[in-house]
Image (cartoon, rainbow, N blue to C red):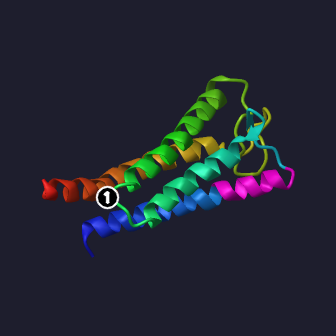
Amino acid sequence: MKRNSLVNYLLFALVIFGFFSVAQVSVSNFNGLDCPSLFSLPVCYIVTAAYGLMLSSLIINHNGCKPHFFCVGWVVAFVIALFASLAEMFGAGGVCPSITGGLRAGSNSGVPLCYISLVLLVCILVLFIKGPYQQACDKYNKKS
């Protein structure tokens, strides 16, 4: 197996993991568990859409749009994860849902999902740069 295909499979697996994980939080929010809101829209819905955009960019077979769709989705998810993690660390706490379910609300139970999302997004970015982005650059440079 070529190195690039391994990077692409790993990237695809991490994006799918992130998408289904945040979709599960969105479904839990829909069923009554809390998710922080941004302008009266639950943040978990925004992050689900961002991961969906990254996933669709990996599925769509058009190299010209792939980096743009991916970057928009990644930036949205990363900014939310970064600010939520900072608020969780330095703020009042209880900002992020936890692995145990629901908002932490000042308790120390469970790992905040914003921390996990932040680490996952950094790994996804590295894999995207080493995989699809590098392939698109190589393809463009061959044309020149």
Q: Residues within 10 Å of mark 1 (few under 14, many from 20)?
A: many
| Residue 60: % across, % down | 44, 65
Please state which amino acid type lies under the numbered disc 1.
Answer: Gly
Q: Is residue 132 magenta?
A: no
Q: Residue at x 21, y 55 (%)?
A: 140
Classify 97 as above or below 1. Answer: above
Q: Secondary structure at mark 1?
A: helix
Q: Tell whether 27 sits left or right of 90.
A: right
Q: Which segment did they paint magenta?
A: 22-32
Please count the marks in the image: 1
| Residue 46: % across, % down | 65, 45
| Residue 121: % across, % down | 49, 47
Residue 111 in sight from this viewpoint: no
Q: Quadrant of the N terminus?
A: bottom left
Nearer to us in this view, 3 or 37: 37
Q: Residue at x 75, y 51 (%)?
A: 100
Q: Residue at x 69, y 48 (%)?
A: 45
Q: Residue at x 48, y 44 (%)?
A: 72
Residue behind mark 1: 131
Quadrant of residue 96 within the rendered picture: top right
| Residue 74: % across, % down | 49, 46
Q: Residue furthest right?
A: 32
Residue 144 in sight from this viewpoint: yes
